[in-house]
Amino acid sequence: MTSQIIPVDPFDFIAFGGTGDLAERKLLPALFQRQQAGQFLEPTRIIGASRSKLSTEEYRQFARTAITEHVRAEEIEPDELARFLDRLSYVSVDAKSGDGFAELEREIGDSDRIRVFYMAVGPALFGAICAKLKEHDLVSADARIVVEKPIGRDLASARALNDQIGGVFDEHQIFRIDHYLGKETVQNLMALRFANALYEPLWNSAHIDHVQITVAETVGLEDRVSYYDRAGALRDMVQNHILQLLCLAAMEPPASMDADAVRDEKLKILRSLAPIDADNAARLTVRGQYRAGASAGGAVKGYQEELGNGQSTTETFVAIKADIANWRWAGVPFYLRTGKRLSARASEIVIAFKPIPHSIFESGAGRVHANQLVIRLQPDEGVKQWIMIKDPGPGGMRLRHVPLDMSFAEAFNVRNPDAYERLLMDVVRGNQTLFMRRDEVEAAWAWIDPILAAWEDSGREPQAYTAGTWGPSGSVALIERDGRTWHDPN
């Protein structure tokens, strides 16, 4: 089975931070893959922009290295790579001083192509870059700006950032990217719910016992030391990735797949989240910080050792019991957890259905397990529907709990595009369905801020957990006091 490739209109892609880690690992490889798949129409250009003093030829060498390191060798056609490098150019730009923007203006010229300005830089530079783009008359009617998280560190700073960007670009031109929403399985969640008569009638409190969302990492700080210690797991993962997954799992059917129709329903979920604050945060949340242990087969340092100062109270693990105060989900808890240095790398959504009301089978047949729908985002994207069947063979009724397993890689036998490939092409098309609207970002912060304040006021330090485990004991207690257990992604 092959996927259909629909070309996009010619565009100019300007990557601020074009020599940075994101451009190297994700943006340049993603754009190369889309060209190689036949999705570009000519003339399309890619312009790197950063403070580094490079020539265009040196930038092309940087891009060649990035692609050969981050794209499998068997997926690189030499002629396509040469063609891709030919469309690259480079301008040295300093966002703070404004140096180089005149050269960037000359490089772009008076082209009427779609312009994509990608902010692969820290949010502190968003406002300055936007102001310079406006000053040099580079914001055309067909311009788009793409901004990475974090959009602020609380509601007030998020509003300030949105004001800065919105002072130059209209809302329909602003693409707040969350790469989790570009994953194939996340989009398949909508297909599962809204294209199948099997699930949607059961997608409510009458049939679902609870929902679990897990985003687990085995890595530690890596090269994000300064950012992560200021942010922590709640800001870094819950405010954006996990709440977006919760919205897609819980939202009402939109009137259509129009971007605003989808985002209207997501916004309703964010505004329906029951408040967590100083009155209930100790009961509904757990924060942890990893200590030395073993991960991925080797000994690893604790967070304080990696940080080097031994004083941080930043959380590297969060577990939350969230409730959605509406008719569909009344009484159905959503258990959220994320952390670093956990037992396995896994991102998944588990829909746990209620058990059958009465078993007709004798005790010797075995336990009847409740059905589960497990949507795996990474690694090995796929969907498993756990059901009860009879164990084959003679000897009476013996029940077994087995999965109907659909792996995307096996079912479709095609390369699974990286999330950035899909999202970048959606930006060029002007399709905002998988991007966050301003009011979504601010509604998420409005729910997160009281949790942060409650933690700050409590004075409690994060619970310690050993690297290579599934987090602090408090996260186990959080769910087990309700008579439930965390699903094991392993």
Image: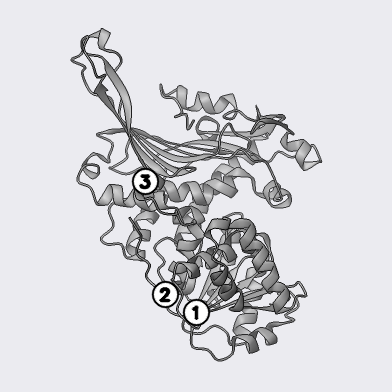
| Quarter of the N terminus within the rendering | bottom left
Residue closer to the observer: 451 or 289: 289
Instruction: Depth check: give the residue in front, 101 or 464.
Output: 101
Identify which residue, 263 or 370, lies in the foreground. 370
Does dot 3 land on a helix, a strand or a loop? helix
Q: CA distance from mark 1 to mark 2?
A: 8 Å
Q: Is residue 416 left or right of residue 338?
A: left
Crowd tier of the residue under label 2, counting other residues whose Cα lies within 10 Å: few below 14, some 14–19, many 20 or above = some
Task: Residue 73 in the image: state x and y as whole percent.
Answer: 58, 57
Q: Is residue 383 shown left or right of residue 81?
A: left
Report the number of discs: 3
Which residue is denoted by mark 3 in the rendering? 249
Rendered view: 163 above or below 448? below
Disc 1: which residue = 11
Residue 487 vertical placement versus 137 (above, below):
above
Q: Residues within 10 Å of mark 1 (few under 14, many from 20)?
A: many
Residue 139 quadrant: bottom right
Q: Percent position (x, y) of residue 306?
A: 76, 40
Task: Tell me if residue 92 can be seen.
Answer: no
Pair 1/3: label in front: 1
**Left or right of 362 in this view: 337:** right
Q: Is residue 92 above or below residue 341?
A: below
Considering only vertical position in the picture, is 422 above or below 138? above
The residue pinned by badge 2 equals 8
Q: What is the three-letter code of the residue carrying label 1?
A: Phe
Q: Quadrant of residue 47?
A: bottom right
